[in-house]
Amino acid sequence: MPAIPLRSSRRNGASTVEMALISPVLFAIVFGLFEIAYGYMVHHLIQDAARQGCRVAVCYGESNTDVNSKINSLLQAEQISGSTTKIMVNSSVADVASAKSGDQITVQITIPASKVSFFPATGYLRGQLTALCTMRHQ
């Protein structure tokens, strides 16, 4: 009995070339989605840290050291580093210990996007991520 020859496909090479052309685009899209989603997550985390820091700042007897320690502990728990915190009383940088009842306390946290980027060379995230929270002193 003669051997039956296997069917050979003439498209084997073409499908390999097509995959080689499409895979970089596919990977760029997938990595971009990861990068942007992580950027949104970090932005949410620094917004929460600014709100928590502002809650500490509006309480009587607290100081900028207390606010910064609260913010730093929250961000370190999430392994976020490289942030800058600015604490303002009535729109000017001051110590919250000097704030009077009814003054507006603002906590602003800024972090360069390159500090939170998985792939900084791609440029998916640029600029800075900033979170701001304002409350009245009690």
Image (spheres, grey):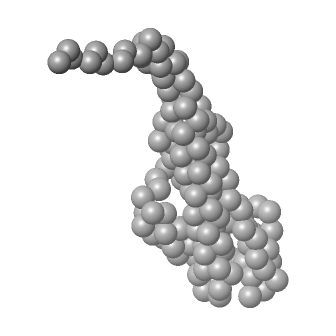
Q: Residue at x 59, y 51 (%)?
A: 37
In this rendered view, identify the residue nearer to me: 58 or 41: 41
Q: Quadrant of the C terminus?
A: bottom right
In this rendered view, identify the residue nearer to me: 27 or 66: 27
Give percent across and percent down for residue 84: 57, 53
Q: Residue at x 41, y 16 (%)?
A: 9
Question: Image check: 62 left or right of 118?
Answer: right
Question: Image check: 91 left or right of 1?
Answer: right
Question: Image check: 79 left or right of 57?
Answer: left
Q: Quadrant of the N terminus?
A: top left
Single out the residue that lies furthest toward the front. 1
Q: What is the total number of numbered labels drawn onto the structure image?
A: 0
Vertically, is 118 above or below 135? above
Q: Residue at x 76, y 71 (%)?
A: 134
Give percent across and percent down for residue 71: 53, 68
Give percent across and percent down for residue 115: 50, 44
Give percent across and percent down for residue 99: 72, 78
Q: Residue at x 58, y 35 (%)?
A: 29
